[in-house]
Image: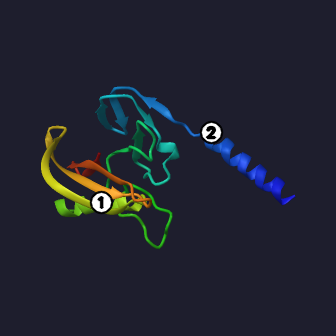
Amino acid sequence: MKAWKICALASAAVTLAGCANITAVPPGPFAAGEHRVTVGRTWSDVTSISPAHGKTTHVLSVNGPLLDTLYISEPLGAGDRLVEGSDKEHPTPAIRADMSANETVEFVSDSVAATGLQKVETSHLRPATFEGGRALRFDLTASTSNGLEIAGSAKVATVNGKTYVI
């Protein structure tokens, strides 16, 4: 009887996982709330199967979220999170209205660490532009729990009191 229940639960989990809404994102403009980003190739919107994404964060991938991931936030206001964690005792970082440039970089790196990546480091902080205004760009490195080293970059801008993260 227990084996039957386990099989039934496993079957239900597989069925529910098959209901996840993964859609193609063709090259061109991609809307993240009121924010539009132009993607240069076809991506898949894997937000629905990404457990750590925040309520206002879209997660795109080309080869699957374990191999490549692009996080695009909708405008983040004070108290919003880039990613959501399940540990109530160690909540993921929330954006503050008065963050300095260094605190904003820490916000992003701590959010990346909250997804389960380890040894998250930032480097090469440099100026960038975002919708005609000033932004910060920096590089990130990290590793998975299995030791796979990954690298990427981030761009962060605050416009009219809202923070945007790519």
Q: Residue at the right extreme?
A: 1
Drawn side of residue 93 relative to residue 103, left or right:
right
Type of amino acid at the residue the image marks with label 2: Gly
Q: Circle 1 — which element?
A: helix
Q: Is residue 8 above or below residue 97?
A: above
Q: Quadrant of the C terminus?
A: top left
Q: What amino acid type should be assigned to the residue bearing mark 1?
A: Ser
The front one of 55 and 17 is 17
Tell me if mark 1 has few (under 14), some (14-19) or many (20+) residues whose alpha carbon lies within 10 angstroms of its own.
Answer: many
Q: Quick one: 81 or 34, which is closer to the camera?
A: 81
Q: Position of residue 51 (x, y in %)?
A: 50, 52
Height in image: 37 above or below 122? above
Q: To which residue does mark 1 refer?
A: 109
Viewer-proximal residue among 124 and 71: 124
Residue at the image point whose x is 77% and y is 51% from the top = 7
Q: Residue furthest front?
A: 147
Is residue 37 positioned above or below 121 on the image? above
Residue placed farthest to the bottom in the image? Answer: 89
Quadrant position of residue 95: bottom left
Q: Is residue 54 left or right of residue 17?
A: left
- Ranked by sequence position, the earlier of labels 1 and 2 is 2
Residue to which mark 2 is pinned: 18
Q: What percent of the width, then of the height, locates residue 114? A: 40, 61
| Residue 109 can be seen in this image | yes
